[in-house]
Amino acid sequence: MKILLISGKASWFMNKFNNDEVAIAFDEYRKRGVIDHDWESWASLFTLEAKYVEHFLGEFRGREQISQWIVSTMEQYPNISMWMEWWAIEGDKVALYIWNNLPDPTGKGKRYGFPNTTYLRYAGNGLWDYEEDFYNPADAERVWKEWFNDGGRIDTPADNTLRGIEDWAPEVPDIVIPREEVEEEFRKYVRRGETAVQTGDWSPWADQFTEDARYYEHHYGKFHGRSAIKEWITSTMGPFPQMTFPVDHYVIDGNRVIALVPNCLPDPTGSGADYSFNVHVILHYAGNGQWSYEEDVYNPNEAESVVSSWVKAGGSIS
C-alpha cells in the first residue's frame, strides 16, 4: 500500500490489481464500445451496482440502468465514430482522452469533432464499478450545429478513419524524466495552488509554466504563454478566494499527469452541504520544475449551478 498526502488528505493507492489485468479488461472495454459499438455488450462490463456519471446527461446507477441509457442514447447517433487518442492505467484507475467525430458532409476534408475525458475504476473479474465523463456541452452543441448547417444528416454514414483534430493540444515533451521527479513536481503544483488560495497571489503558481506554455480551459478558452496564463488565472480566481482544490486522485503516464480535482466552495450555512464540481486536469511536464501544458475539462453549466446555489445559501463573491 502506498499512501500519499495531497491537499491535506490521505490518498490510498491500493494496487489490488496488476496493470496487466487492468489492461486486458480495458482492451475489452475499448473493443466493445469504441471499436464495435456493441453497447449492450459494453454495458455488461460494469458491475451490477456500478455508478456512471455523465456530467451533462446525468447519473446512472447499476448495470441495467447504464445499459438502457447507453443503448438508447447511441442509437440516436449512428454517424458518430470514436477514437481514443491516449489512455493511462495506474492501479485500479484508467484515465483516457477520446474523440467524438462526425463525417464530413462537404467532401472538403472539414473536421467536426470534440473530445471528452473519462475516469474509469476497475473492480476485478473484468468489470468496472465507476465511470465519469467530462466535456463542455457547448462544444458538442457547436459541432452538431455546424455539421447540420453544412449538410450533415443522421443517415450520413460514420467515418471510422477520423482521428483527433490537428494541433488541438501539443505533444507531451519527449524527454526521459524519472517518475519520482514528475510526481514531486506535481505535489509542488498542488502546494502552490494551496498557497495562492491563502495569499491571493497566483503569480508563483503561474510561474511554474514554461514561457511558451499552452493552457486550454474548456470554458474560458485557450491561453498561450506564461504571461497570458498569469493574467487569466489572477483575474478569474480573484472573486473566489474561498475556493479550494483538493486532489481526489491522479495518474502519471510518462510526462503526462491526469488528476481529478474537485473545485470546492465552503458551506456558508455550516450544515455540511456540498458545493463542489469536478474538473479533469491534464498536465504535461517539461522538466526543470515547469509545465508546458494544462487542459481543464468539465461542464461549465455544472460549475455555474454550484456557484449560484452557493451564493443563494449565503456565499459571497469578492
Image (spheres, rainbow, N blue to C red):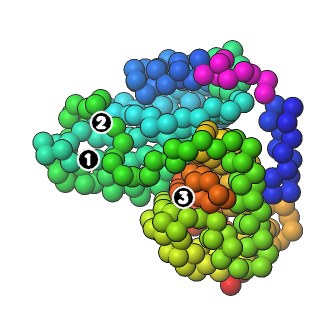
Residue depth check, mark 3 versus mark 2: number of the one nearer the observer: 3
Residue located 28% across and 31% down the image: 161
Residue marked by disc 3: 292
Q: Is residue 20 magenta?
A: yes
Find numbered disc 1 in the image and state the secondary structure of the residue it sits on. Answer: loop
Residue behind mark 1: 111
User: How far is mark 3 from mark 2, CA to CA?
Assistant: 27 Å
Residue furthest top as drawn:
125
The residue at which mark 2 appears reads as: 162
Label 2: state its secondary structure.
loop
Tell me the quadrant of the picture where the C terminus can be found: bottom right
Q: Amino acid at mark 2?
A: Leu
The reply to whether dot 3 and dot 2 touch (C-beta < 8 Å) is no
Mark 1 or mark 2, which has the lower sequence index? 1
The residues tagged by marks 1 and 2 sit, at their Cα atoms, a distance apart of 9 Å
Q: Amino acid at mark 1?
A: Arg
The residues colored magenta run 15-23
Residue 205, picture quadrant: bottom right
Q: Is 109 in front, or is 72?
A: 109
Residue 104 x %, y %? 20, 42
Position of 177 compared to 223: left or right? right
Q: How many circles with numbers are drawn on the protein?
A: 3
Query: Which residue is located at x 63 percent, y 31 percent?
Result: 89
Residue 59 appears in the figure: no
Can residue 94 be seen here? The reply is yes
- In the rendered structure, are the residues bearing label 1 and label 2 in contact, judged by CB atoms less than 8 Å apart? yes
Query: Which amino acid type corresponds to the residue marked 3 in the rendered image?
Result: Ser
